[in-house]
Image: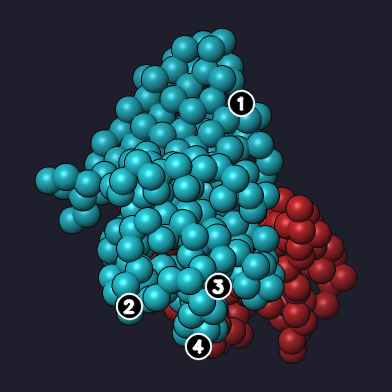
Chain colours: A red, B cyan
Amino acid sequence: MMMETQRIPIVRLQGKLIVSIQTALSDTVVDRLQQDVATACERGDARGLVVDVSGVDILDSYITRSLRDLAVMARLMGVETVVCGLRPAVAMTLVEMGMELPGVRTALNLDRALSLLDSLQPVGSSGDLVLGDDDEEDGEA
Amino acid sequence: MNEIAGEVLAILRRYLSDPTSRSLLSSAARRASVRLETVSRADVSALVRELGPGLNIFLQEPEKLQNCKSLLALVATEHSSQASSMSMSSMSTSSYEYHAPVESRADGISVPIRAEHDVVRARTLGKDMAKQLGFSDVVQTKVATAVSELARNIFQYAGTGEVRIRRIDGKRRGIEIVARDQGPGISDPALILSGAYRSKWGMGAGLRGTKRLVDEFELDTHPGLGTTVRIRKYAE
């Protein structure tokens, strides 16, 4: 149906990529977003990525994992990611399911996410980022 | 406006603005020769039928349109099942030709899972139904998430199947979801639920998570024959 062509826009703003998800997420939409973010990161002028999920009312295991993968992927490409705007009901559901977002920075809202990105050292210059080896097939056991 | 009309209006307002909902409802009532002050159970199916054309115009997203119509059809079904047998015959299937594969009957809504967007539809319906039952925002989200997990498992592992959502009336009000498929089945359900097993797409995480979100969880699976998962969530 129409879902197939749906794309989530990626906005560039002052050296940051901003993705605001305001639609029901299907697996295809999330997968496409992952590819689009990778392409956007590849352009090389972005220092950070914010994924605003305040418009998302359901995050199930697959979508949560895809968001996590997206953040890890962006970080591997040198773009730090902050996920923000998780609704209280969504956060509570994720905790109850035993699914968290390990290794992903989160912020209350877009504003704080942007300040958080500004406060971060450029990727690679600090030692606090442990890449890759800790999450072979993830930690939400 | 009486209680039944109010119920219909409440559903419309979830998808449309208040003024639009009201004007759609009153024009539908006019066409169906029904007075909103005195809508009887027998009138509901005619009223819902007359709402169809208006909804087609105002609800652009096919997903929302189908969900809204499914919920409305559910109101009609509920009311007619309690009404006389005469009204039962007046709501034969021909009254519900709105091209939506979602099927409504007395025992709930059945959503066939055949394509990926059916997963989204099933969970939206689950949430809407939980909302209608007066569940809190958190419980609505839990129900919808559980539906999403079950529907996705059907789509990914069995290809096709069905999710049926119904309300539980009785001492404890609640919602029941039955997800059924004729897929490959699960060879070792205990292993999957224990968390020791992890599939490529995370079925283990999905099923374990679902179990933790609901009050009752039953898994019935036969390798080669299919899987049925039945979950229940009660109002707190």
Q: CA distance from mark 4 to mark 1?
A: 44 Å
The residue lying toward the viewer, choosing from B194 and B109, is: B109
Task: Report the amino acid beneath label 4.
Answer: Pro
Q: CA distance from mark 2 to mark 1?
A: 48 Å
Local packing at callout 3 (Cα closer than 10 Å; few below 14, some 14-19, many 20+) is some
Secondary structure type for disc 1:
helix
Q: Which residue is mark 3?
A: B31
Q: Which mark is residue B37?
A: 2
Q: Is residue B221 above or below residue B25?
A: above
- Which chain letter matches label 2? B
Q: Is residue A4 left or right of residue B233?
A: right
Q: Which mark is residue A78?
A: none
Percent of width and height locating residue B195: 40, 30
Secondary structure type for disc 2:
helix
Residue A99 visible in rendering: no
Q: Earlier in the sequence, mark 4 or mark 2?
A: 4
Q: Quadrant of residue B221?
A: top left
Task: Report the amino acid beneath label 3.
Answer: Arg
- Which chain letter matches label 3? B
Percent of width and height locating residue A53: 55, 70
